[in-house]
Image: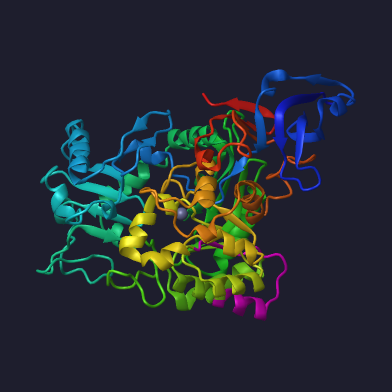
Amino acid sequence: MEPTTIYPASIVYTMDPSQPTASAIAVRGDRFCAVGSLEELCSIENHEVNDSLVNKILLPGFVEAHSHGMAAGLWLHTYCGFFDRSDPNGVLWPGCKNIDDVIARLRDAESSLTDPNVPLLAWGLDPIYFSGDRLIGSHLDQVSTTRPIFVLHASAHLATVNSALMQAEGITSEIPMEGIPKDGNGNPIGELQEFAAMSLASSAFRSFFGRMQSQEAKWDLGHLANRAGITTLTDLGNPSSTRQTTIDEWREVVDHDDFPARFFIFDTPATSQATSETIFSIQEQSSAKLRLGAVKVILDGSIQGYTARLREPGYLDDRPNGIWVFPPEQLTELLRPFHESGLLVHVHCNGDEAVDVFLDAVETLLNEFPREDHRYTIQHCQLTTPEQYERIASLGMCVNLFSNHTWYWGDQHVASTVGPDRASRMNSARTALDSGIAISMHCDAPVTPLGSLHVAWAAVNRQTASGLVLGPEECISVEEALHAVTLGAAYQLKMDTEIGSITSEKFADLAILDEDPYTTDPRNLRDIPIWGTMLGGRIFPVG
Ligand SMILES: [Zn+2]
């Protein structure tokens, strides 16, 4: 019989209702084979005791059910976000607190580029934080009037570009397309909203996303996950996930013994029955670490970018309603073949109007073709009303809330986008749980940094960056939040029989902490140090 390794710990939180806590785990191969006390487990034949986790707090490895494969690759470009942020090597980059900071950071990066034809590529920008004039293309002209500059926003749904880029790519007042705001004279201001408009910045857009596909960027994603205690990540979604080269490149990294996480790639499909068959067929290529063959659809944009689709009364500061990234009248038709072939489908709906469209589609499809245990999941689900939650519950759907939004954009939502009442109901985890809905919570990295403890902290405290508690009625307990980022997330990925709790037969995946999240002051939950992870029985200390 294979030898068993027993790890005594300070305490083990299992997420398993029949035995919520323990003091030791036993691992055989890549699975847990028993959970209990050291004394109990020592009766296992052919075992050895490993004391390396004896002072540690063990939780199931965190599961991030909404992140992106490019979360680490962005660090190959210049960071100019508002908040301080750590790169994959653990180096902290200070946030850019005003327009001058952004210009200074970009000038610095520009001066290190030797080839005058190479575009300057940057990310993390969000003009909503800066008072006074909105940061637009003319500000970037202060960095260079000759070199094209492309700056992706924090939401990843918008970009700001300079005049040189617009000139090179022919982005003029003539282009009859949504998502290119103009000034009083009818000239584009240098903002490209949503993917169709952003792709007009063709050569900069291609090199921006091209460099992030490197194998180095994939390895860095594993480093970011390890620092956050995350053992299962997602790429939600990938427009080329059915391409064999995409699968092979990810497999080379993810299936390597040294890569510290499982990785589930969702496809972002266009349409047609053929797509459904292809997505279904790539499931066969899944491994214990690499998962393939699920669907993600993006319906609307982002609230802080004013591109999410809102019900009446729309945006508070009188902007036009957002952008449909996918035509709402075609959603049912798009989903029908996925529904009938039993694929797992998650749909991005930031605004409450987008949620209505998804609910209508699911109701129609379930009436036509009843399906058990579908786990249709609303991604973000930020402005959802209590009545919509009732409908979500009755349709048996799940929600994955963007709880980090309260911290990163809560103040802006109160002041500018939706006002205090709707901001208070954003990411309403309490209402969702009380409605009997299976929830998870996510960071949407790179939109906000990978970090399940931060995500949980945000749902427990609902604190904004200025210190306001936004909708205290919607706070949930530490226990509920940690369940949401472990077993709750695993459930939405249909991986709950394999991961998400410390239960015999499941993969031996752990988040290994230096302090106990259940006894720490909940206000400090996000500051608990991560010592490392265990993946499939192998320990990965934070390096
Ligand atoms: Zn996303």
Is residue 249 among the parts visible in the rendering? no
> Is 9 on the left-hand or right-hand side of 336?
right
Q: Quadrant of residue 538?
A: top right
Where is residue 348 shown, x and y percent of the image? 49, 62
Task: Identify which residue is drawn at 28% across, 55% down.
Answer: 128
Q: Is residue 542 magenta?
A: no
Is residue 452 among the parts visible in the rendering? yes
> Is 536 on the left-hand or right-hand side of 424?
right
Where is residue 209 shown, x and y percent of the image? 36, 46
Task: Identify which residue is drawn at 86% across, 25% down.
Answer: 39
Q: Report the span colored magenta.
A: 360-381
Colour treatment of the image: rainbow
Where is residue 303 shown, x and y percent of the image? 38, 62
- Count of numbered labels shown in the rendering: 0
Which residue is at the front of the view, 38 or 376? 38
Where is residue 46 shown, x and y percent of the image? 87, 21
**In the image, is residue 235 above or below residue 278?**
above
**In the image, is residue 319 above or below residue 403?**
below
Which residue is at the front of the view, 405 or 281? 405
Q: Quadrant of residue 157?
A: bottom left
Which residue is at the front of the view, 533 or 429? 429
Which residue is at the front of the view, 55 or 250? 55
Instruction: Name the quarter where the N terminus is drawn.
Output: top right
